Amino acid sequence: MNLASLYQRANEVQRHDAKLILSEYASILQWRSDGQDSLLDVGSGPGNVLMDFVHPLLPKSFEQLVGTDVSMQMVRYANKCYERYARTQFQVLDIGCEELPEQLKGRFDHVTSFYCLHWVQNLRAALRNIYNLLRGEGGDTLLVFLATNPIYEVYKVLQSDAKWASYMQDVDQFISPLHYSTDPVKQFEELLNEAGFVYKNVELRSEVFVYEGVQTLKDNVKAICPFLERIPMAQHEEFLNDFVDIVVSMNLKQDTKANAEHSQERFISPYKLIVAYARKSPDYLQNVFNDLGNVKNVKGVM
Ligand SMILES: C[S@@+](CC[C@H](N)C(=O)[O-])C[C@H]1O[C@@H](n2cnc3c(N)ncnc32)[C@H](O)[C@@H]1O
Ligand SMILES: CC(C)=CCC/C(C)=C/CC/C(C)=C/C(=O)O
């Protein structure tokens, strides 16, 4: 996903969800008493969600704000857009990497991520890294990403079409790792446990977004579709038209009667969003838990 400027103009649903969820969690995030918070955002893209909705929540004396993304193009674009912001920078980071850069380990009070983790097949590695980004004596994380979305079913149908199959052999790599889960909340809670998080709250929110007009739908697909850059430009419109035809066949286009008062076609996208908040136990508390493991029948703590 590398079309930074197009994504910045066509990310309405992502911005809507991030803004709403941050308004709910602003008072739950454990801000430091000295106001010198450090925050890292995973998969920041062009940076406008981070800078429009997270940056304003930070205390005035915050220590540092680091936006990260696997895409160098996104990082370059974000650094250019926000170069005048103090103590703010964007850098390349693959959250699914084997080993975090040393200079990032244990440095952050908060890790946030919006509409990124559904792009990461190895959630176990991602959560291990998120845990290790947080400072040893605590810290918390707010993670918002897709469990399911109809786009993944559209991709599967397109992949079965001989016209597009050769460009989409790895389609499963781009489907949310929780899309086929029978219990995404339980699955993600278990992954958070495994990473070491002690306090956690994981919700699965059923949402619906309406795309007003076929061009709006196409622009939003173009902004995030990983297959278009593999397809010759001359065939992009045909691909997008086939995409829309499949959406219509899935009965996701609002019927004309219901649509009577609207001048444009409306496309309905029912999706499920994971909203996960977790806290890292302070090292000293972790030691207590470790000690407890050696003492049977302890009363009180737990
Ligand atoms: C849909 S955009 C979300 C951008 C921004 N957080 C927002 O809410 O608008 C997803 C971003 O995640 C990035 N991404 C995908 N896989 C990643 C990975 N393994 N590590 C870090 N970023 C990744 C993509 O490059 C893209 O910029
Ligand atoms: C009706 C229909 C299939 C709508 C899906 C439209 C769309 C562009 C969904 C994007 C999902 C996604 C992977 C978003 C992201 O990563 O930001």
Image: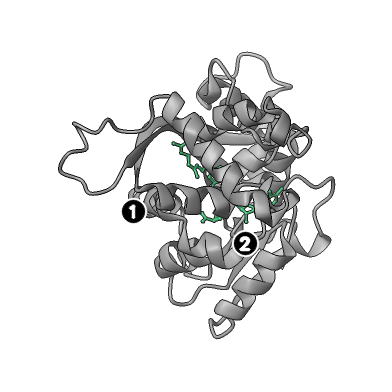
Secondary structure at numbered mark 1:
helix
Choose the circle earlier in sequence order: 1 or 2. Answer: 2
Find the residue positioned furthest to the bottom. 84
Residue at coordinates 54% horizontally, 63% vertically from top-left?
6
Does 209 sit left or right of 94 as displayed? left
The quadrant where residue 248 appears:
top left
Distance from disc 1 to disc 2, alpha carbons, whole Å, reads 28 Å
**Is residue 196 positioned above or below 133 on the image?**
above
Q: Residue furthest left?
A: 261
Question: Residue 23, which numbered label?
Answer: 1
Front position in the image: 59 or 174: 174
The kind of residue on which mark 2 rests is: Leu
Q: Which residue is mark 2?
A: 3
Q: Residue at x 54, y 59 (%)?
A: 7
Label 2, ligand 1: CB separation under 8 Å? no
Q: Quadrant of the N terminus?
A: bottom right
- Residue at horizontal 76 percent and vertical 39 percent from the top: 167
* Residue 28 visible in image: no
Q: Residues within 10 Å of mark 1 (few under 14, many from 20)?
A: some
Coordinates of residue 290 in the picture (x, y in percent): 71, 30
Q: Nearer the viewer, residue 252 or 3?
A: 252
Q: Which mark is nearer the camera, 1 or 2?
A: 2
Q: Closer to the camera, 191 or 267?
A: 267
